[in-house]
Amino acid sequence: MGSNGKLVLDFTGKVVLITGAASGIGLATAKMFCRLGACLALVDQDENGLMSILQKCRKIGCEPYGICGDLIVPEEVECIAKKTTERFGAKLDVLVNGAGILHEGTLQSTELECFSHVMDTNVKSAFYLSKLLLPQLLRSKGCIVNVSGVCGLRTFPDRLSYNMSQAAMDQFTRSMALDFGTKGLRVNSVNPGFICTNLHKASGMDDKTYASIVKSSEKSHALGRIGKPSEVASAICFLASPLASFVTGVTLPVDGGKQVMCPP
C-alpha cells in the first residue's frame, strides 16, 4: 500500500535480473522495473544496445548493472551467474528470462543446425541460467517470469521450431512451479502475441510483410491492434509483484485476444 492507501507496485530493495534487456520487451521491462525502484542486473549479447539501456535507466534514476554475454554459450551463462552473485551476494528476488529469437520455417525448410539454435536460445539458456541462480531465488522465496509466446498456446503455420520452443517454455514454467511451490518460489510466464518490437525483422521479415501483419491485426486480434512492449512489461511486473502472491504455474496471454480468435 502507498502512503495514500492505494495499491502500488514497489520493488525498492529487490534485485531483478533480466535477459534480453537491450531491446523490445526486455528493454521495456528494464525501464519499468527501474521506475519501480528495483536493483537491476541487465543481460544482453548486444553490447551497444546494453550500454544504451543502461544510460536510459540512469536517466530514470537507478544505477543498473550490465552484463554482456551470449546465453547459448554455457561458459558465458556461468559467468553471468557468477557476476550477478559477486555484485549482489546471495540476493536475487526476480529472474526474467526474456531472451529469445523468432524463426519461420516448416520441417522441410528447417535445418537441424537452425532448429538447435532456436531451442538453445529460447529454452536451453533459460533452463541453465535458472538452474544456476535457483539457490538465490529459493533463499529469497522469489519468482521467475519467463517470456514465452502465444505460439506456446496456439499453433501457427510455418513456425515449427519456434512453436516447439514456446511450448517447451510453457512446460518449463509449469514444471518448476510444481517442483518448487512449497519452497516459496513462484514461476509464471507471459505469452505475448504480435508485439511491436524488432524481433520479427531480426528474423528476416521484410517491411512489406511486417506492414501486412500490422494491418491484418485489425481483424486477427480481438482488440483490433498489435501490442506495445510496455504492455507486456506491465504483466511481467505484476506477476513478479506481491499482488500476484497466489499466482504460480500460469501462462498468461498478453496478446490482444489473438489466441481466442477463430482462424479467418
Image (cartoon, rainbow, N blue to C red):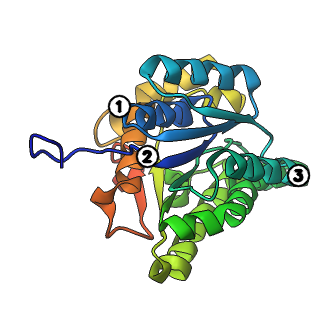
Along the viewing direction, whichever of 209 and 169 lies nearer the viewer:
169
Residue occupying the point 46% across, 44% down? 193
Gap between marks 3 and 1, in whole Å?
41 Å
Provide the residue designation for mark 1: 225
Gap between marks 2 and 1, in whole Å?
36 Å
Pointer 2 with pointer 3, Cβ within 8 A: no
Provide the residue designation for mark 3: 75
Of helix, strand and loop, which one carries label 3?
Answer: helix
Residue occupying the point 62% across, 18% down? 52
Camera-near label (3 vs 1) is 3
Gap between marks 2 and 3, in whole Å?
29 Å
Residue occupying the point 72% across, 28% down? 204
Say left or right for 11 vs 199: left
Q: Which mark is residue 13?
A: 2
User: In the picture, which quadrant includes the C terminus?
Assistant: top left
Classify 183 as above or below 107. Answer: below
Amino acid type indicated by mark 2:
Gly
